[in-house]
DNA sequence: CAATTTTTTGGTTGTTTGATCAAATCATAT
DNA sequence: ATATGATTTGATCAAACAACCAAAAAATTG
């Protein structure tokens, strides 16, 4: 109501809606034809708007991809974190992490496809690919996982394995499922999720 | 000596040399500026030749990338398979598989970077990304790994875990190391290799 | 309802792309 | 040395690209 409300959210209502529509169309485009072919006109076509409108709402193509990447990371991170934080034991948290990660990816395959396309294609101005950049800050999932594992070792729930290697193995196993279609075809998400939890449970046991 | 020898190898000597030079330049280009920016002129520049010469030796850009991908897969596969086949026990083969995979990747980071760039960007004519295509035929590493694990279970060396999930976990852990720079920075290849072998040894134990 | 700001479009810009061509060079064999 | 075929180049092509702009349209304000 107050005068400030107009610009309080830093964005007008309609501008924010348009930005989200464009990002949604970008997800669809990346999923369908990949980063290389995902031109502004292809995204605009899927959104039913002109290409210039994308340029109006985003500085350039890289800006659009960056914002979309952040958006995708935030949504998946908050979903997973919410489930993890419901648990009290380290074992419970670890199980929740694995199950939630796989469940979210499985529920939104096109979002995951878009995420992969961006991470493996976008580069910093000095040509460093995103998948090589990640500070701990940029890869919040790995940080969460490491915290769970460390906590479990400190409170005596877990055995004395190598933290980083165990974390990579778990993250790798999660990522591998969505990326590799032979596995996806052979094993259902539920089976994979259950079996991975079993396996990890065994691996962390004292 | 015979008349046939000229064309017996399917390729003239000089043509084969040129093709390898172009593929080597393509590796360097993919590593430096990524698939998106790897135009024919960028590859030609690094090879010190004209772009038309690439078109002369390869049908089109996709052909070049396909042949390079096969070349990269063959080289890494034969290296790893050779080490695996030296071993007689399933445990020995599994260890050799892990150590050789990491060692080869670590010894040829630019080749691995090029492989990743192609796999995550190249698409079939009907826009299916390569990393989703792979039949068992197209992913020989996964087939080898599964065979080792199955054999180990059949001859009683390994416990009774889920084959596909265990294989994904191992493959994921191997792939994760080269892809994630935080881990690469924190843990040396030797340490990672040793710890992963330990961890997997524990996971497959009866 | 008139003035003003935000939003949207169509059209234009200059660049870069992959591919093709005829012509030039090179190697080889006769 | 010359004829033949393989190799290489520079020039050129249309197509696609991201970015830009002036003007139209829509929404918001006074």
Image (spheres, coloured by chain):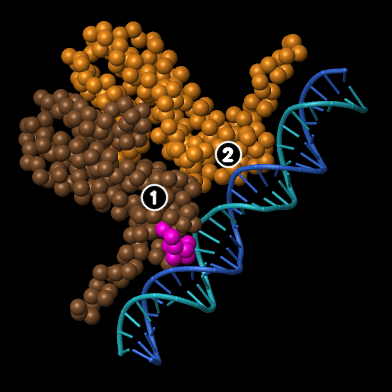
Chain colours: A brown, B orange, C blue, D cyan
Q: Is residue A50 magenta?
A: yes
Identify the residue at horizontal 10%, vertical 45% (top origin).
A86
Q: Which mark is residue B61?
A: 2
Identify the residue at horizontal 26%, vertical 30% (top origin).
A188
Q: Which mark is residue B46?
A: none
Q: Secondary structure at mark 1?
A: helix
From the top left corner, tell me how far across and down residue A129 is, in percent: 41, 45
Q: Quadrant of residue B99?
A: top left
Give the CA distance from mark 1 to mark 2.
26 Å
The crowd level at tag 2 (other Cα within 10 Å; few <14, some 14-19, many 20+) is few
Magenta span of residues: A47-54
Q: Which residue is mark 1?
A: A28
From the top left corner, tell me how far across and down residue A148 is, in percent: 15, 39
Q: In this picture, is A32 found above or below B110?
A: below
From the top left corner, tell me how far across and down residue A96 is, in percent: 15, 39
Identify the residue at horizontal 59%, vertical 43% (top origin).
B40
The quarter of the image holding the N terminus of chain A is: bottom left
Q: In this picture, is A182 found above or below A45?
A: above
């Amino acid at each position: 109501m107050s005068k400030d409300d107009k610009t309080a959210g830093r964005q007008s209502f309609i501008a924010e809606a348009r930005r989200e529509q464009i990002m949604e169309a970008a997800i669809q485009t990346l999923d369908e034809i990949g980063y290389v072919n995902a031109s502004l006109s292809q995204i605009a076509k899927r959104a039913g708007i002109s290409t210039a409108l994308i340029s109006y709402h985003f500085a350039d193509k890289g800006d659009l991809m960056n914002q979309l990447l952040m958006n995708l990371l935030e949504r998946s991170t908050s979903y997973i974190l919410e489930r993890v934080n419901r648990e009290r034991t380290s074992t419970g948290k670890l199980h929740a992490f694995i199950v939630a990660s796989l469940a979210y990816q499985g529920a939104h395959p096109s979002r995951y496809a878009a995420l992969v396309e961006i991470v493996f294609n976008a580069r910093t101005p000095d040509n460093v690919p995103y998948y090589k950049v990640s500070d701990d800050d940029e890869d919040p999932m790995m940080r969460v996982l490491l915290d769970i594992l460390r906590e479990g070792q400190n409170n005596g729930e877990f055995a004395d394995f190598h933290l980083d290697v165990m974390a990579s193995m778990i993250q790798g196993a999660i990522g591998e499922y969505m990326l590799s279609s032979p596995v996806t075809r052979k094993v259902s998400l539920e089976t994979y999720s259950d079996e991975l939890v079993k396996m990890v449970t065994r691996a962390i046991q004292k």
